[in-house]
Image (cartoon, grey):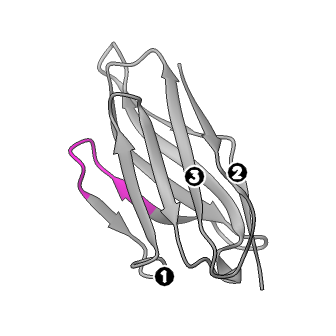
Amino acid sequence: QVQLVESGGGLVQAGGSLRLSCAASGSFFSIDAMDWYRQAPGKQRELVALITAAGSTNSADSVKGRFTISRDNAKNTVYLQMNNLEPVDTAVYYCHAQVTAPSRRKYAYWGQGTQVTVSS
């Protein structure tokens, strides 16, 4: 079993910055891709950014140039640096990880979510 614990959400004014963190703990062989999703009220959950175990990244067009995903494999932690935030970025942000268990079976886990609110 793996737990993902997010932190770093909060209230910020438009143009401000926040840094989200997501730490993985538990029993696993390896953590593969790690992603950040978000879900705004009344909308579907959407992928914000992803990073592979090797460090390759990709992000949604809406956040390119403003958000940066990174990870520290030694700490089993993924980060999302969010700059120049806009009110449309207001959402609950979820960490998601693809994990290889000690059995070598693969599983996906979600964090509990952290609220990001951007005021205009």
- Looking at the image, which residue is at 23% across and 55% down? 56
| Mark 3 and mark 2 residues within 8 Å of each other at the beta carbon | yes
Classify residue 72 by image quadrant: top left
Q: Hey, what amino acid is under mark 1? A: Ser
Residue linked to disc 3 = 20
- Disc 3 or disc 1, which is closer to the eye? 3
- Looking at the image, which residue is at 44% across and 52% down? 35
Check the image and report above or below for 26 versus 39: above
Residue linked to disc 1 = 62
Q: CA distance from mark 1 to mark 2?
A: 19 Å
Task: Give the extent of the magenta segment.
Answer: 49-56
Q: Hey, what amino acid is under mark 2? A: Thr
**Quick one: label 3 or label 1, which is nearer the N terminus?**
3
**Quick one: label 1 or label 2, which is nearer the N terminus?**
1
Check the image and report above or below for 22 versus 11: above
Q: Is residue 113 found inside the magenta-colored segment of the image?
A: no
Q: Hey, what amino acid is under mark 3? A: Leu
Residue linked to disc 2 = 114
